[in-house]
Amino acid sequence: MPILHIKGGVPLVGSVRIGGAKNASFKLMIAALLAQGESRLLNFSRISDVETVAQIIQSLGAKIKRAGERAIFIYPDSLNNFAIDADKGGQGRFSTIFIPVLLHRFKRAIVPAPGGDKIGKRPLDRHLQGLRALGAKIKEKDGLYFVEAPTGLTGTHYRFVKNSHTGTETLILAAVLARGTTILENAALEPEIDDLITYLNRMGAKIERQPQRIIKIEGVTHLRGTIHKIIPDRNEAVSYATIALATKGDVIIENARADHLQAFLAALDQAGAGYEIAPYGIRFYYRQPLQATQISTAIEPGFMTDWQPLWGTLMTQAQGKSTIHETVMLDRFGYVESLKQMGAKITRFQPKITQPNQVYNFNLSNDQPQLKHAIEIKGPTELRAGKFAVKDLRHGASLVMAAMLAKGASTIYNVDQIDRGYENLAGRLCSMGAQIKRINLT
């Protein structure tokens, strides 16, 4: 089990080239199984979620080959198994995305409930209701979903009651080889979904985004393998940017795309942070004391919930009172207690909301009275070093940032959670001046 020893107080200075988006990479790998023949996917990051999905694909009978530094070749024609191992499938939020592939290939699927970060109950009803609308029959027993479509899937008109990133992707994969036309309303707008659409269309699909959050999919009879380069990871870009700004550093993030970061850049304007957009990517640098901000997370094109723990950590260094209102995930303030142990002045509170069903994107039926969906952060605050265990991916990134700010040396445990979404985070930070040692305990 790896741990990190981090000595704080050193500005982050240098450059880093970000790899393919985590939230696109493994979904494109799964989508490749819909095709006939080889697909070549480029610009992969070496993260454990990708490795886990590769192992699942191979357990289903398909073949995968590493080729070059960041390329994966996928050969789906030998797929011969419709059941996903519960241990592997439950490690991330990708298990239900396999359902459309297995239904198209075998007309049945057995998959475990998804795992991933502990950020509140995942609204799988949005996935399952859409699959049922396409003709799937679904039963749940002992943490497994048993899904059948004996006569195949048929196009439908389906509206998401609440927006769903992964639900949108799941139904796109289900509709692309279904009979007839599917219309998805209130579909998600994330660039990772657009990357999936681009890939599928290159494979021969007929998918079109329309105004008012509508996606139209005309079912086709078959898809063919193709070559596709994955978009850069915007969450990784925000991670290095916030660490650079928090440590009063200066970092160039090669390959970062401003069009994928509009809400984040707007928040930086509010905070008075420095950044420059150029053909090489984006430079983020400290130019003056950061100012307090008022942020609400929102579905695309709003401020991403994935950025919220990083932004909350950054705001411990801003002048004044900052607020963050989390409207996307039910419970994404798991990092707050760790920051408070390090000396951060953070208070949770519940904003007065007159129409919560229109404000919150999680299912209100899952809400708990004791949960408060906003925090107030008083800064700037000098943080103290300590020993902490990572709870989830973004909690881990926020702990690393806080430890780099703190006086003294901190120890971070459960680093494998960070490895799920970051490629060699400690090594890349060290290349820009951070003082971090990664130790593998036996």
Image (spheres, grey):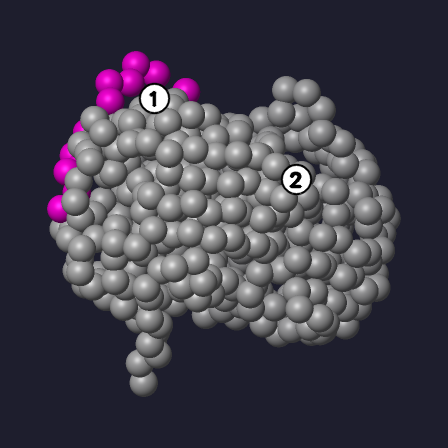
Query: On the rendered image, what quadrant is the N terminus found in?
Result: bottom left
Q: Is residue 362 above or below residue 52?
A: above
Q: Residues within 10 Å of mark 1 (few under 14, many from 20)?
A: few
Counting from the top left corner in percent of width and height, residue 109 is at: 62, 60
Which element carries disc 1, helix, strand or loop?
Answer: helix
Could you tell me if residue 383 is visible in this image? yes
Asked which quadrant contains residue 142, the reply is bottom left
At 71% from the left and 29% from the top, the residue drawn is 209
The mark tally for this picture is: 2
Name the residue: 56% across, 53% down: 18
Q: Amino acid at mark 2?
A: Pro
Along the viewing direction, whichever of 80 and 73 lies nearer the viewer: 73
Question: In the rendered structure, which amino acid carries the disc numbered 1?
Answer: Pro
Asked whether residue 270 is drawn in magenta, I would say no
Where is residue 59? Give x, y as percent.
62, 74
320 vs 129: above or below: above
Q: Name the mark on residue 356.
A: 1
Mark 2 surroundings within 10 Å by alpha-carbon count, few (fewer than 14), some (14 through 19), many (20 or more)? few
Magenta stretch, residue numbers: 343-358
Identify whether 272 is placed above or below 414.
Answer: above
Numbered circle sitting on residue 418: none
Q: What is the CA distance from the residue labelled 1 to the residue labelled 2? A: 42 Å
Residue 96 seen in the figure: no
Say which residue appears at 77% left-offset and 36% top-offset: 207
Q: For the view shown, which residue lies furthest in the top direction?
A: 354
Please provide percent x and percent y for residue 252. 51, 46
> Of residues 62 and 429, which is closer to you in this image?
429
Q: Is residue 293 left or right of residue 343?
A: right
Name the residue that disc number 2 marks.
279
Q: Nearer the viewer, mark 1 or mark 2?
A: 2
- State the image coordinates of residue 56 (x, y, percent, origin top left): 59, 69
In this rendering, position of residue 179 left or right of residue 88 = right
